[in-house]
Image (cartoon, helix red, strand yellow):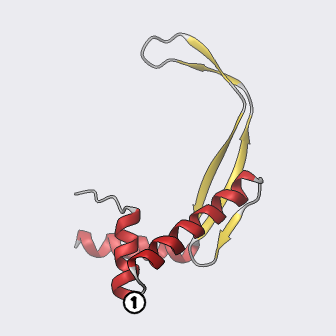
Amino acid sequence: MTEKTITRADIVDKLVSEVGLTRQDSSDYLERVLEMVCEELVADNSVKLARFGNFVVRRKNARVGRNPKTGKEAPITARRVVTFKPSPLMRRRVEAALASKEK
């Protein structure tokens, strides 16, 4: 299975070709949407995009971890992480697309 990473430029190109926006407007809109999502996550708010999924900030407690190479214990500090949970609709679409590729 070949992996393709979608970049900002790819999204901008799609907006230009499918929506008809200029390249600059497409880039500006995409950048602003991503900024808005980041601002909300920094403020500890969840971001719910209907029919796409939820971005949620989770707090992880400090714990003791282990270096897998040496086996030596190391402290892991408390931190916040962003998790993504796809919507049921997105999950079904991806599963259906993957199933049709396997045939």
Residue at image coords 37%, 61% = 7
Q: What residue is at 53 percent from the left and 66 percent from the top?
A: 31
Res 101 quadrant in image: bottom left
89 to the left or right of 100: right
Q: Residue at x 72, y 51 (%)?
A: 42
Query: Which quarter of the figure is the N terminus placed in?
Result: bottom left
Of residues 44 and 3, which is closer to you in this image?
44
Q: Nearer the viewer, residue 101 or 42?
A: 42
In the rendering, at what x and y percent does residue 39 appear?
Answer: 69, 58
Locate the C terminus and report the quarter of the image it occupies. bottom left
Reading the image, the residue beneath label 1 is: 20
Q: Is residue 23 left or right of residue 61?
A: left
| Label 1 Cα crowd, 10 Å radius (few <14 / some 14-19 / many 20+) | few
Amino acid type for the residue under numbered disc 1: Gly
Vertical placement of residue 32 versus 80, above or below: below
The quarter of the displayed image where residue 100 is located: bottom left
Depth check: give the residue in front, 22 or 99.
22
Q: Residue at x 42, y 71 (%)?
A: 94
Percent coordinates x, y for residue 96 in the rendering: 38, 76
Above or below, 101 relative to 72: below
Q: Is residue 69 above or below residue 16?
A: above
